[in-house]
Image (cartoon, rainbow, N blue to C red):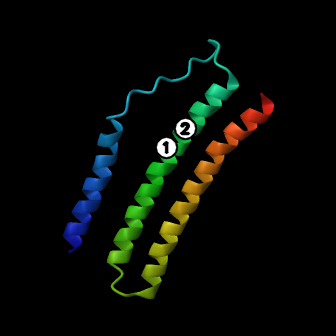
Amino acid sequence: MKKVLTSIIAVSLLAVPVLSLAQPPITPPRWGEGENIWAILDTVINYVFWGLIVLAVIFILIAGYNFVTAAGDPDKTKKARDFVLYALIGVLVGFLAKGLIYFVQSIVR
């Protein structure tokens, strides 16, 4: 059972970079060529946001592994639930940060 779970997690972790290759290449901002601060800030927030999403997926996979291997131990199941809770809080903070940029931009413009 442990070998199956380990192989599933390993395949999942290897699939994330492969799936990211399916995206069109992201061109970095050209500093000083007419880029305004909002476009640069939006690009940085996008990089941080997608990094946060990948990190949340990894945390949820770790939580699932801990939950399955807990074997009824209340401490391990609590730890797994905390991992899921922290991952969801991180995603929520990411969405709020992404929305805050657009909110501030609509007020300033």
Query: Is residue 86 toward the left or the right of residue 60 in the image?
Result: right
Query: 105 and 48: which one is in front?
Result: 105
Q: Are marks 1 and 2 in contact (CB under 8 Å)?
A: yes
Callout 1: SS: helix
**Image quarter hosting the C terminus:** top right
Structural distance between the alpha carbons of marks 1 and 2: 6 Å
Residue 8 location, quadrant: bottom left
Question: Residue 79's x, y, as percent?
Answer: 48, 76
Query: Which residue is label 1 attached to?
Result: 50
Query: Is residue 109 toward the left or the right of residue 26 in the image?
Result: right
Which residue shows up at 56% across the image and 57% down it?
90
Callout 2: SS: helix
Image disc number at residue 86? none
Query: Which residue is label 2 attached to?
Result: 46
Q: Residue placed farthest to the top in the image?
A: 33
Q: Residue placed farthest to the right in the image?
A: 108
Q: How busy is the neighbourhood of tag 2: few (under 14 within 10 Å), some, or many (20 plus)?
A: some
Looking at the picture, which amino acid does disc 2 mark?
A: Asn
Looking at the picture, which amino acid does disc 1 mark?
A: Trp
Position above or below: 45 against 64 = above
Question: Residue 85's x, y, as percent?
Answer: 53, 68
Query: Is residue 56 toward the left or the right of residue 36 in the image?
Result: left
Question: Residue 100's x, y, as percent?
Answer: 69, 43
Query: Is residue 92 toward the left or the right of residue 61 in the image?
Result: right
**Image quarter hosting the N terminus:** bottom left
Query: 54 and 2: which one is in front?
Result: 54
Position above or below: 43 against 30 = below
Which residue shows up at 41% across the image and 57% down it?
58
Position above or below: 78 against 92 = below
Position above or below: 86 against 18 = below
Which residue shows up at 28% across the image and 49% down it?
14
